């Protein structure tokens, strides 16, 4: 695999990053599926991830080494960011979903956060972060109330385009939504 120069660069936030709008479960619960919620102020991953790492380090301690995100919700996709003299690797996974960020680090540090879109209204974002940060919550990221995401790309703006893409990739659509039981022979 040939890597471009931008893949090898470490992006650093040149200004003071905004204070992260973050709500964490206190105390952390091993039963909860989520550790809290995060409401970024923009779709610039360098600025937002710098503020997130700074806030998480201050609140939970530990060394953050990796962050996993879905690329669909962000304007660009850096592979590394510099925060406080350390380098944090950023992984972009389309299978993760735009509503989840996973932060990992040393000594089994793992923090799963729901991500609320920057353009979400204050009341909706606060409700989503409150639900995600409940220590007794067993809700997964998919169970948090949906928040508006970025507009769909023009290429997949029409539902029939999505169907055509799926069919051309070898998938088959089922029009019934009821699960079927396995057939025993």
Image (cartoon, rainbow, N blue to C red):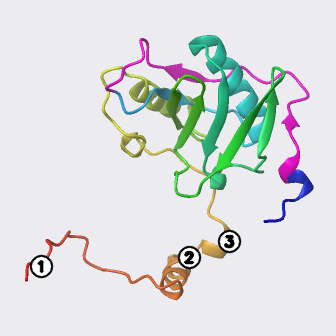
Please check the rendered image and state whether residue 27 is part of the magenta-colored stretch, yes or no.
yes
Is the residue under label 1 in contact with that under label 3 (CB below 8 Å)? no
Question: Whole-Å distance between the Cαs marked 2 and 3?
Answer: 8 Å
Residue 43, placed above or below residue 183 = above
Residue depicted at x 51% and y 33%: 113
Within 10 Å of disc 2 (Cα), the crowding (few <14, some 14-19, many 20+) is few
Q: Quadrant of residue 82?
A: top right
Residue 162 vs residue 92: left or right? left
What span is colored magenta in the figure? 7-31
Gap between marks 1 and 2 measured at Cα: 35 Å
Q: Position of residue 184 (x, y in %)?
A: 8, 78
Residue annotated with mark 1:
183
Mark toward the viewer: 1 or 2: 1
- The residue tagged 2 is 158
> In the image shown, does 18 or 122 lie closer to the viewer?
18
**122 to the left or right of 55:** left
Give the quadrant of the C terminus.
Answer: bottom left
Q: Residue at x 65, y 17 (%)?
A: 57
Measured as percent of width and height from the top left, residue 31 is found at 31, 26
Asked if disc 2 and disc 3 are in contact, CB closer than 8 Å, the reply is no
Instruction: Give the mark count.
Output: 3
| Disc 3 target residue | 154
User: Label 1's element?
Assistant: loop
Local secondary structure at mark 2: loop
Q: Residue at x 84, y 59 (%)?
A: 3
Q: Secondary structure at mark 3?
A: helix
Please say if 138 is above or below 16.
below
User: How much space separates mark 3 and mark 1, taking CA atoms?
Assistant: 41 Å
């Amino acid at each position: 695999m040939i890597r471009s120069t931008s893949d090898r660069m470490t992006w650093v936030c040149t200004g003071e990053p905004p204070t992260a709008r973050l709500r964490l479960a206190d105390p952390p619960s091993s039963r909860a599926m989520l550790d809290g919620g995060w409401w970024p102020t923009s779709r610039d991953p360098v600025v937002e991830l710098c503020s997130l790492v700074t806030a998480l380090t201050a609140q939970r301690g530990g060394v953050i080494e990796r962050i996993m995100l879905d690329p669909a919700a962000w304007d660009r996709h850096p592979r590394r960011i510099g925060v406080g003299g350390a380098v944090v690797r950023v992984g972009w996974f389309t299978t993760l979903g735009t509503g989840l960020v996973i932060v990992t680090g040393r000594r089994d540090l793992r923090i799963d956060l729901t991500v609320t879109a920057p353009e979400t209204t204050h009341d909706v974002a606060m409700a989503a972060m409150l639900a995600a940060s409940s220590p007794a919550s067993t809700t997964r990221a998919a169970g948090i109330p949906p928040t508006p995401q970025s507009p769909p790309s023009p290429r997949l703006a029409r539902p029939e385009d999505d169907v055509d893409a799926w069919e051309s990739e070898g998938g088959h659509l089922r029009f019934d939504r009821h699960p079927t039981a396995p057939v025993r022979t």
